[in-house]
Image: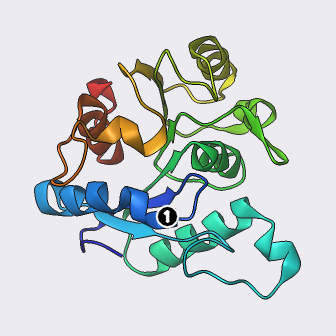
Amino acid sequence: MVGDGPATVVFSHQTGVSGLCGFWPFAVWLAEQHGIRSVLLDHCGVGGSACADAAFAQNRVAQLKLAMTWARTHGATRLSSVGASLGGTTVTVAAAQTQSDAVVNLSGPVTWIGLDARRAAPRVTEPTLLVVAPDDSVVTTAQFKALRSSLGSRTTAFMQSPAGHGWELLDTSDGPPFQPSGVARTVAAWIQGDFAAA
């Protein structure tokens, strides 16, 4: 957990061994500049996370929902979920099953390892922000525009980043220190309920 504000965001990471760490610089920036609390988890089998129950270990949505429940019971008065790549698919599918205040999908493929964002979309009623770069090899601009039109939410936004994939869309630097992109600033606003920022 990073930060201690009542506005809280739960992150679902993209594939790869780094797990939650890819979001860490952004979470620190959110805490320092916006007073937002971040809950970062390693999904089962990634980073330092080991899950004994086989069914739970294969269910990314259940893992995310558990983290969101934890956040609610630990002081979150406003709760959002943000996912990168596979995490973007995860937060979209999870939003169809549980209520939050906002959802942000960064480059999430519309379908991946049993998760189907297109099928879930009509049941997603939370304000939802979709962000993708035109050169993304995992999801296309056209797919995200179609996904947006399928969402059950009345408040949606589509944002195109110049380049990058997943959490790369948040940082304009090639390394430390973190330099927030326009996407990062929009996501921060979205987490705080400023949906006009997109």
Q: Residue 186, position in %: x, y?
A: 28, 34
* Quadrant for the N terminus in the image: bottom left
> Which of the pair 3/127 is nearer the observer?
3
Q: Residue 163, position in %: x, y?
A: 39, 23
Q: Residue furthest front?
A: 174
Which secondary structure, mark 1? loop
Tell me what residue is drawn at x 87 percent, y 74 percent. 55
Tell me what residue is drawn at x 68 percent, y 73 percent. 44
Tell me what residue is drawn at x 63 percent, y 73 percent. 66
> Which of the pair 87/37 is nearer the observer?
87
Q: Quadrant of residue 74?
A: bottom left
The residue to which callout 1 is attached is: 18
Q: Residue 147, position in %: x, y?
A: 66, 22
Q: Residue furthest bottom?
A: 52
Q: Residue furthest top?
A: 142
Q: Is residue 8 left or right of residue 80?
A: left
* Quadrant for the C terminus in the image: top left
Q: Quadrant of residue 116?
A: top right
Q: How many marks?
A: 1
Tell me what residue is drawn at x 46 percent, y 61 percent. 10
Residue 28, placed above or below residue 15: below
Amino acid type at mark 1:
Ser
Q: Is residue 147 left or right of residue 57?
A: left
Dot 1 alpha-carbon crowd within 10 angstroms: few under 14, some 14 to 19, many 20 or more:
some
Q: Is residue 95 left or right of residue 133?
A: right
